[in-house]
Image (tube, rainbow, N blue to C red):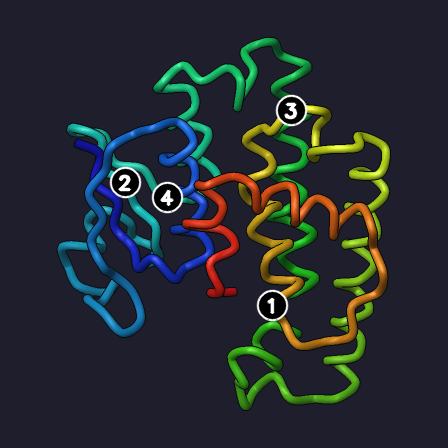
């Protein structure tokens, strides 16, 4: 059985849990990370030298990095509906997964640490205002994309790209800041919320 190491409140662990629910992969999860077993323990570092969750063990195969994990799971279990085989269709999914990791995530990092985690190192008012504006700018990009597809990030059908982006949308709405009116994003949030797996691991009240 697939083994998942990481606490369930982690947004990156939740990507893996949500993917497993969509693909119907049975798994066992172990609590690792802040508040649980330390990721700096020697037995964890042998699995991931970065000391970060999630990590999966699939038989004798070890993998870390959440986006790599969900791609692997979709490919391993032949779920072409989530992650296409055809090169251009797959590249479109990868484009938005990578955008979430490299651009969208960076835009909300400071604001989230300030407003949700209340980190003392993230309380500069100017930096916070800049971060909120940058986050809104990226959400506007997403709003335009969703407005053009009318449904999900890639098109009319749910894909692997909706997992990381759907979790970021949850974080957007659960963070106490002024939210510009992005109707397509709001509709997307409600559309995702009709999925049982999203209610379990996406819109579960844990930003």
Which of the marked residues, 1 or 4, is nearer the chain's N terminus? 4
Tell me residue 174's x, y (percent).
60, 67
Q: Residue at x 42, y 19 (%)?
A: 75
The residue labelled by disc 3 is 157
CA separation, marks 1 and 4?
A: 20 Å
In the image, residue 95 above or below residue 173: above
Q: Say which of marks 3 and 4 sits in front.
A: 3
Q: Residues within 10 Å of mark 4 (few under 14, many from 20)?
A: many
Question: Considering the numbered disc 4 on the image, is that residue within a helix, a strand or a loop?
Answer: helix
Q: Residues within 10 Å of mark 2 (few under 14, many from 20)?
A: many
Which of the marked residues, 3 or 4, is nearer the chain's N terminus? 4
Which of the marked residues, 4 or 2, is nearer the chain's N terminus? 4
Q: Say which of marks 2 and 1 sits in front.
A: 1
Question: Considering the numbered disc 2 on the image, is that residue within a helix, a strand or a loop?
Answer: strand
Which of the marked residues, 2 or 1, is nearer the chain's N terminus? 2
Q: Residue at x 43, y 24 (%)?
A: 74
């Amino acid at each position: 059985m697939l083994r998942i190491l990481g606490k369930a409140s982690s947004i990156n662990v939740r990507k893996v849990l949500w993917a497993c629910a969509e693909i119907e992969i049975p798994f066992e999860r172990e609590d690792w990370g802040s508040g649980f077993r330390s990721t700096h323990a020697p037995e964890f570092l042998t699995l991931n030298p970065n000391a970060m969750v999630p990590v999966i063990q699939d038989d004798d195969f070890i993998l870390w990095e959440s986006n790599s994990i969900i791609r692997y799971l979709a490919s391993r279990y032949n779920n072409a509906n989530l992650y296409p085989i055809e090169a251009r269709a797959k590249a479109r999914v990868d484009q938005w997964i990578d955008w979430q990791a490299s651009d969208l995530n960076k835009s909300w990092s400071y604001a989230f640490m300030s407003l949700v985690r209340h980190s003392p190192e993230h309380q500069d008012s100017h930096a916070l205002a800049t971060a909120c504006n940058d986050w809104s700018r990226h959400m506007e990009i997403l709003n335009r994309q969703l407005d053009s597809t009318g449904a999900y990030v890639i098109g009319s059908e749910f894909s692997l790209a909706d997992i990381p982006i759907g979790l970021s949308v949850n974080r957007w709405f659960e963070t106490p800041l002024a939210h510009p009116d992005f109707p397509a994003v709001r509709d997307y949030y409600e559309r995702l919320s009709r999925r049982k797996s999203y209610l379990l691991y996406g819109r579960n009240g844990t930003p």
